[in-house]
Amino acid sequence: MVKKKISKVLTATLIVSMLATGIIVSIQGKTALEVAKTAGDKKVEVIKGIENN
């Protein structure tokens, strides 16, 4: 009976840690995408500025 409880606790802990990891990865992914988009927008502005001169 004790082994079953320990097993359930370990399983729950593993699931929670996997969910937390997934959330962290998705947050970092969005941040990286936003940084790339911002850098892309700045590049476009620079190119437009060069064309106008």
Image (cartoon, rainbow, N blue to C red):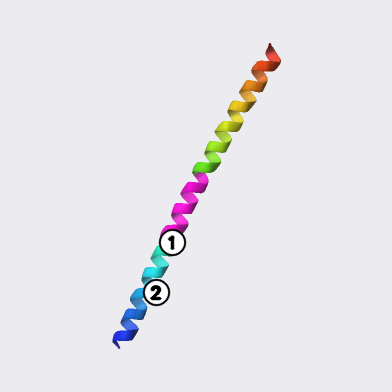
Q: Amino acid at mark 1?
A: Leu
Residue at the image position 58 percent from the left and 35 percent from the top: 37
Query: Circle 2 sits in a helix, a strand or a loop, which is it?
Result: helix
Decide whether the magenta segment is chiefly helix, strand or loop. helix
Q: Residue furthest bottom?
A: 1
Q: Residue furthest right?
A: 51
Q: Locate residue 46: give its quadrant.
A: top right
Name the residue that disc number 1 marks.
19
Could you say where residue 27 lies in the image, as x and y percent from the top left? 46, 48
Could you say where residue 49 lies in the image, as x and y percent from the top left? 64, 17
Could you say where residue 16 lies in the image, as x and y percent from the top left? 39, 65
Query: Circle 1 sits in a helix, a strand or a loop, which is it?
Result: helix
Residue 22 sits inside the magenta stretch: yes
Q: Is residue 32 left or right of residue 17?
A: right
- Res 11 label: 2
Residue at the image position 45 percent from the left and 55 percent from the top: 23
